[in-house]
Image (cartoon, coloured by chain):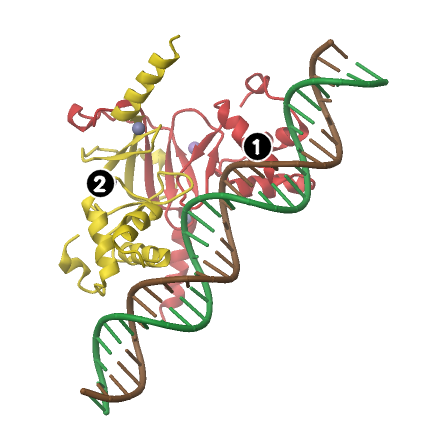
Chain colours: A yellow, B red, C green, D brown
Amino acid sequence: MILSEIADIKQTPQRLAIIEYLESNKVHPSALDVYKAVSERFPTMSFATVYNTLEKLKEKGLLIELSIDTGKKRFDCDTRPHHHLICVKCREIFDVFTDFILELPEDEFHGFDIIGNHVDFYGICKKCKEIEGSDLELNKD
Amino acid sequence: MILSEIADIKQTPQRLAIIEYLESNKVHPSALDVYKAVSERFPTMSFATVYNTLEKLKEKGLLIELSIDTGKKRFDCDTRPHHHLICVKCREIFDVFTDFILELPEDEFHGFDIIGNHVDFYGICKKCKEIEGSDLELNKD
DNA sequence: GAAAAATTTGAATTTAATATAATTTTTAAA
DNA sequence: TTTAAAAATTATATTAAATTCAAATTTTTC
Ligand SMILES: [Mn+2]
Ligand SMILES: [Mn+2]
Ligand SMILES: [Zn+2]
Ligand SMILES: [Zn+2]
């Protein structure tokens, strides 16, 4: 997100803090994650401001709402077209920038006008593999 | 879902009604959709039973929980590997059985053990296109 | 047929998201 | 600079989906 893109949004300290947090991490945070992180440096921050800001950024096309998690929305401030790699254990989300050719055959169109696609890869992340490994060690006896 | 697969689940009337509803439609219903449909024929049905049953079927691998919609879970009783085509207007979900080769290059693995993938195609369905069309007609004057 | 186990039910609780209204801050006009 | 209007923030209230709970009911086992 570059400043020129948010030129038409009023740049309040709260909003800048939220944007800065979104920019500075790649974890695809939930609204609660954003609130927690930002309210540390900004104790008066309200949850409503987080939602308002996320909504405004979404409207402007500067933020993407992910439906990867059931139960809560997660946000991605990288608006370039890309896919995701999701850990089925801890739900960490990594970016995948490989471009795949996904031609849907005519007979699968169901009468739709197709406008895009998104691939979710599923797996177990490095951290969770290590935890699993040490669990096995512990359970051996 | 075939009976032999639910042999180890106690087949109560409520559960059979829920399973029958899931089988008989392809709309990828939400828990509320299931509750509404089944409680018509089964007025004493409790919401908790719907959730309990969906959870049990999920555990047995007979039902897949979709995170396609932010805000609520949707369920798919077709457990064959397949992808989805989603209308961005009305959120109707259609099945896509084309098999895509999605080889993730080594440098995008992020240390993961990859176990699968899923493609969401986005578009506008026939119904919504028609509604849009008639909206345009109305707005012409 | 009685005891144990499993399921259903309605109500209560939790969590995420949204809406509201009063206050504060920012912007723009006079 | 003062003042009025507009916009944003805040705390609180409300809503919606999901989950938990304990009592009542049904099913299974002995
Ligand atoms: Mn991303
Ligand atoms: Mn499906
Ligand atoms: Zn993980
Ligand atoms: Zn549609």
Residue B138, located in which quarter of the rendered image? bottom left
Q: Look at the numbered disc 2 and say if its residue's Cβ is closer than 8 Å to ligand 1.
A: yes
Q: How many marks?
A: 2
Q: Is the shortest distance between ligand 2 and the CB of mark 1 under 8 Å? A: no
Q: Which numbered circle lies on residue A26?
A: 2
Indicate the amino acid at tag 2: Lys
Give the image location of residue D24, x and y in percent: 75, 35
Q: Within 10 Å of the Cα at label 2, are there few (<14), some (14-19), or many (20+) other Cα atoms?
A: some
Q: Is residue A19 above or below residue A122?
A: below
Local SS, label 1: helix
Q: Residue at x 35, y 58 (%)?
A: A46
Whole-angstrom CA distance, mark 2 to mark 1, is: 36 Å
The answer to whether residue A125 of the structure is visible from this angle is no
Is disc 2 in the same subunit as disc 1? no
Mark 1 nearby-residue class (10 Å; few <14, some 14–19, many ≥20): few
Q: Residue at x 40, y 38 (%)?
A: B67
Subunit that carries the residue with mark 2: A
Residue that numbered label 1 is attached to: B52
